[in-house]
Amino acid sequence: MRVCCGLTGHLELARRPDLYGKPVIVGRWDEHVVAASEETLPFGVTPGMAMRQAEHLCPQATFVLPDEEATDRIRELISASLYDLAPVVEVRGEGIAWLDTSGVAAPGASIRDARHRLLKAIGREPRLGLSPGPFSARLAAARARPGHLLRVADAREFLAPLPSRELPLDAEQLERLDLLGLRTLGAVAAIGPRELESQLGRDGRHAVQLARGLEPDQLDAWRPPLFTSAHRQFEEPVEDREALLFVARGLCSDLADELGLRGAGAKHVRVRLELESAARETRESVVRHPLSSTVELFGLIGGWIKEWQPSASITELWIELPVLEGAGRRQLRLWAGGDGTSQEVEAAMERLQERFGDGVIARVSFA
Amino acid sequence: MQEVALETAINSIRVRFGSQALTRAAEMPPPQPWSSGTPVDQLTGIGGLPRGRLSLFTGSGTSGKLTVALSLLAQATHEFAHAMVIDGGGFDPWMLIPFSPEPGALTVVRAPAPEVAGEAAATLARAGAGFILMLGGVPEHWLGPLESGANRSGTVLVGVVDAPNRALAHASSFSLGFSRHDWIWERGQLVGLRVTARCVKNRVAPPLGETELEIRYPLGTQTLTDHRVQVTEVIDGLEPCASAVV
């Protein structure tokens, strides 16, 4: 396993790029600090401490209320944008993005792309680390300069001099390590897992494995959501087909952008018309090749709308993609030819078959 | 203020009809040629059939236009992932065998009506099929989508018709008129025909002229695959001719 880690700072801070370079503390009053910018570190502010204490330590900081929903959206956005760079991608709200580059043909290019995409998403240069596992990759990234990559060949050797406080243990367990004189990861790695397990429980064994660079943890791979939809509600009920086509194209474009971000394609397409004084009308189709571009989506949906005869004025148009399929990195220009993407041509032929019957397309064989 | 309004109008056109529906003239690339390796390339003036434009082969029956088109189609099956035939009726894939095509790249669209042919051609051109051969005309209202689709994707579009209607002739960027002027007989046996291919319209380069082609049929008891239909140019130099816009 070769894991690249990009550190960006907590995603709560990414919501306010206008405050970059200033001391910022995120948290709710009478609760704990959720995130703090690097500029607050000299004042002794750390995530997890009481907000009131943080306010005393760094009164000049800007205090921001956390917004979990917005942070989740940013995390989804980053996950989606990194999805096609490596088979396994995990992004955490703390501002950690991991990519497992094992098996990637050009890992260097993937890491470069990851840096650019993180910069674009967050607005700050990420610190990058490349190591045999997620734990050592994160620690390597934390020690890299912004926009630079720190490579680690031997995880155990790299970890040995680092403080044992880097281990994912609670405050009490870390205190106990300190009392035992295990102040570096090298010292933790030198004792047996059973010995530390007897002191700290199961976490002790885990800590020894981490300190030895054995990387017991696996990444929790992000998967694109399997359903998406877009809709438009009309202020005035619509009867004009041109207007409906116009709106449908816009919705297809939005959905295609979203699918592109997720690296997904639609296997099932459903269009729903909500009518003013009649029951809703629906048309749907399962396609053999996933549709992901505006042209592909609108080619199918536009064809339906052109011949649709709704029984009443339309109040709302819904385009739903109930089944998505990970398209990953599309094999563009798969063959020697200089023509367009084979998938788009295949999808176009499929649409023609859906409209005019299977017999309209004949594959030639001289056998 | 006017500039803002103009930019808004341009953006709304792009949103409604696609990003390439409106292109500034300075951004428009010159027509790119697809070199087929046949004598037709020299007649276009750019070294090959124009990509993203409609080329028409016209002429009365038995003038060799379909044979030349089939040789282009066979060549396209080797060079493109998708070579399409929009068949208005009467296309037999076995006619292609003497040209040694790559069958895996060839797809035939059986269009029972011109409307289907038009929609299929426009859809496939927009999707980016490499080469489309249209046997027969398409309704006038499909010519616009067909042209714009091909223009965006760079599809090589070739139409074969006896006599194009006004709209089709107008939509084409390059048009070759074929006329047979002689049969070729050897030892009392008909072995081919001699035709004149004349550029009657050319929007991608100055109209060049005409050339004489010799089209030889596969003969004898040998199987068809032992022969390749020969389409050879008889006249070395190209003679300028008075161009006529169809």
Image (tube, rainbow, N blue to C red):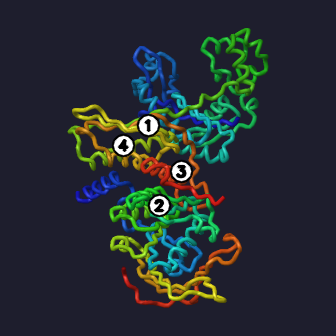
**Disc 1 sits on a residue from what chain?**
A
In the displayed structure, A140 sits above or below A249; it is above
Q: Tell me the CA gap for discs 3 and 1.
A: 18 Å
Badge nearest the viewer, 3 or 4: 3
Q: Is residue A309 found left or right of B69 in the rendered image?
A: left
Q: Which residue is mark 3?
A: A343
Q: Secondary structure at mark 2?
A: helix
Q: Amino acid at mark 1?
A: Leu
- Do tag 3 and tag 4 residues touch (Cβ < 8 Å)? no
Q: Nearer the viewer, residue A208 or B184?
A: B184
Q: Tell me the CA gap for discs 2 and 1.
A: 26 Å
Query: Where does the image place residue A367, in percent across and percent down from the top left?
Result: 66, 58
Q: Are marks 4 and 2 on the same chain?
A: no
Callout 2 crowding tier (Cα within 10 Å): few <14, some 14–19, many ≥20: many
**Disc 2 sits on a residue from what chain?**
B
Q: Residue at 57% of width from left, 66% of height from top?
A: B76
Res B153 label: 2
Q: Are marks 3 and 1 on the same chain?
A: yes
Q: Nearer the viewer, residue A241 or B47?
A: A241
**Disc 3 sits on a residue from what chain?**
A
Q: Tell me the CA gap for discs 4 and 2.
A: 23 Å
Q: Which residue is mark 4?
A: A251
Q: Amino acid at mark 2?
A: Ser
Q: Secondary structure at mark 4?
A: helix
Outermost residue, top side? A198
Quarter of the image with the N terminus of chain A is top right
Q: Which residue is mark 1?
A: A321
Q: Earlier in the sequence, mark 3 or mark 4?
A: 4
Callout 4 crowding tier (Cα within 10 Å): few <14, some 14–19, many ≥20: many
In this orientation, does residue A292 appear? yes
Callout 1 crowding tier (Cα within 10 Å): few <14, some 14–19, many ≥20: many
Q: Tell me the CA gap for discs 4 and 1.
A: 12 Å
